[in-house]
C-alpha cells in the first residue's frame, strides 16, 4: 500500500471512531415540541409558549433557553417583563433598546432570550410553559381601495437550547454554542441545541391598518367637531356674562 492510501485509511478510521464514540444523547436524542397560542384581541396580547421536551436524559439539572426573534411589527417590553418576574414571569435578556412607540416601518427585529427551568410531567416528558405579553406596532396607513386594511404579523416559533450540570461530558461540549447566560444574559455560556419542531403553524396577529382614503373625511370631521365645540363654549360664556 502506498503512503497516501495508508494516510487516507487512518483518517477514515479516526472519523469512524468519532462517529461511534462522540455521541451526545442530550443533543442527538432530545426533542423539543413547541406549541403556541396568542391570547386576547387587539394590539396587546398574551403569547403562551408550551414546550414538551422528550429526552433519554434526566433534565432535572437543566435550564432551557427559549430564543425568540420578533418581527418589526411586534415587540416585547423589557420594563413590563421585569415587572412580571416576581409574579412568575421568566428570567430574560433583551440585548437591544426597545422603543415601544415607533411604528412597524421604523422598527427593527427584536431578539429575546428567556431562561426557564423545565418541569417533569407524568408521562416522562418535561414541560416549559410560559406566557408573556407581546404588543403589535402600528402600521403605515395605506389606501383601502388597493390594499386590505388588515395585516398579519407572524411570530415564528422559538429555538430551544439546554444547559445542564451533569449531563453530556466532552462529546456534548463539542456541540455547544455560545449564547447569553442565565439569569440576566451578561456573559456568554455554552448551550446545547436540541431538535425543535412543532405540530402547528406560527401564530399570527391580525392588525388593523389606517385607510389613507379616509384621511380627508377624518380631517373634515375633526375640524367640524372642534369648531362646533368652540361655538358651544363661546355661546355658554356669552350666556353667563
Ligand atoms: C400552561 O399554562 C396555562 C396557564 O397558566 C394553562 O392554561 C395551560 O393548560 C398550561 N399548559 C400545559 C400544557 O400545562
Image (tube, helix red, strand yellow):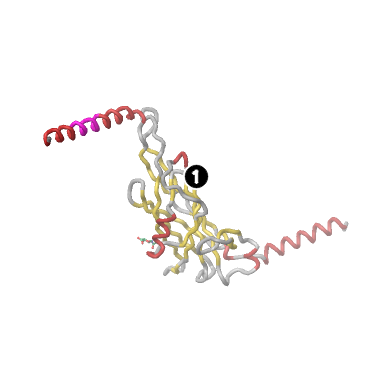
**Snapshot quadrant of residue 239:** top left
| View quadrant of ligand 1 | bottom left
* Residue 57: x %, y % from top left: 54, 69
Residue reaching furthest to the right: 2
Question: Number of numbered discs present?
Answer: 1
- Name the residue nearer the viewer: 78 or 57: 78
Instruction: Indicate whether residue 227 is drawn in magenta.
Output: yes
Where residue 142 sits in the image (x, y, percent)?
39, 32
The front one of 218 and 25 is 218
In terms of depth relative to the viewer, which is nearer, 229 or 19? 229
Q: Is residue 2 above or below residue 225?
A: below
Q: Please tell me whether mark 1 sits on a helix, a strand or a loop.
A: loop
Give me the residue at 23% from left, 32% from top.
225
Q: Quadrant of the N terminus?
A: bottom right
Residue at disc 1, CB closer than 8 Å to ligand 1: no
Magenta-highlighted residues:
224-231
In which quadrant of the rendered view does residue 164 lie?
A: bottom right
Relative vertical location of residue 209 with respect to residue 125 in this rendering, above or below = above
- In the rendered image, residue 18, in percent from the top left (x then y), is placed at 70, 63
Q: Pick the quarter of the image with the C terminus.
A: top left
For residue 167, side relative to residue 43 (left or right): right
Q: Is residue 168 above or below residue 225?
A: below
In this view of the protein, which residue sits in the foreground, 38 or 16?
38
Question: On the rendered structure, is 50 left or right of 172?
Answer: left
Main secondary-structure element of the magenta-colored stretch: helix
Sort mark 1 into few (<14), some (14-19) or many (20+) by Cα contacts within 10 Å. Answer: some
Magenta region includes residue 70: no
Q: Which residue is denoted by mark 1 in the rendering?
A: 108
Q: Residue at x 52, y 68 (%)?
A: 62
Left or right of 236? Residue 54 is right
Amino acid at each position: 500500500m502506498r503512503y497516501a492510501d495508508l494516510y487516507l485509511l487512518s483518517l477514515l478510521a479516526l472519523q469512524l471512531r468519532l462517529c461511534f464514540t462522540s455521541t451526545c444523547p442530550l443533543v442527538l436524542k432530545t426533542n423539543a415540541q413547541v406549541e403556541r397560542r396568542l391570547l386576547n384581541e387587539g394590539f396587546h396580547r398574551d403569547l403562551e409558549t408550551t414546550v414538551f421536551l422528550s429526552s433519554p436524559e434526566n433534565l432535572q439539572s437543566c435550564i432551557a433557553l427559549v430564543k425568540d426573534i420578533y418581527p418589526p411589527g411586534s415587540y416585547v417590553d423589557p420594563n413590563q417583563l421585569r415587572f412580571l418576574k416576581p409574579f412568575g414571569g421568566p428570567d430574560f435578556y433583551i440585548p437591544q433598546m426597545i422603543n415601544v412607540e415607533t411604528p412597524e416601518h421604523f422598527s427593527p427585529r427584536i431578539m429575546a432570550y428567556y431562561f426557564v427551568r423545565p418541569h417533569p410531567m407524568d408521562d416522562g416528558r418535561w414541560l416549559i410553559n410560559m406566557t408573556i405579553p407581546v404588543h403589535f406596532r402600528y402600521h403605515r396607513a395605506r389606501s383601502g381601495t388597493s390594499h386590505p386594511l388588515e395585516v398579519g404579523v407572524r411570530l415564528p416559533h422559538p429555538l430551544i437550547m439546554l444547559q445542564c450540570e451533569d449531563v453530556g461530558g466532552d462529546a456534548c461540549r463539542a456541540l455547544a454554542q455560545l449564547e447569553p447566560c442565565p439569569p440576566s444574559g451578561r456573559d456568554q455560556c455554552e448551550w446545547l441545541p436540541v431538535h425543535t419542531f412543532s405540530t402547528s403553524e406560527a401564530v399570527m396577529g391580525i392588525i388593523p391598518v389606517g385607510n389613507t382614503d379616509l384621511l380627508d373625511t377624518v380631517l373634515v370631521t375633526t375640524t367640524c367637531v372642534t369648531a362646533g365645540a368652540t361655538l358651544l363654549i363661546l355661546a355658554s360664556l356669552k350666556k353667563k356674562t
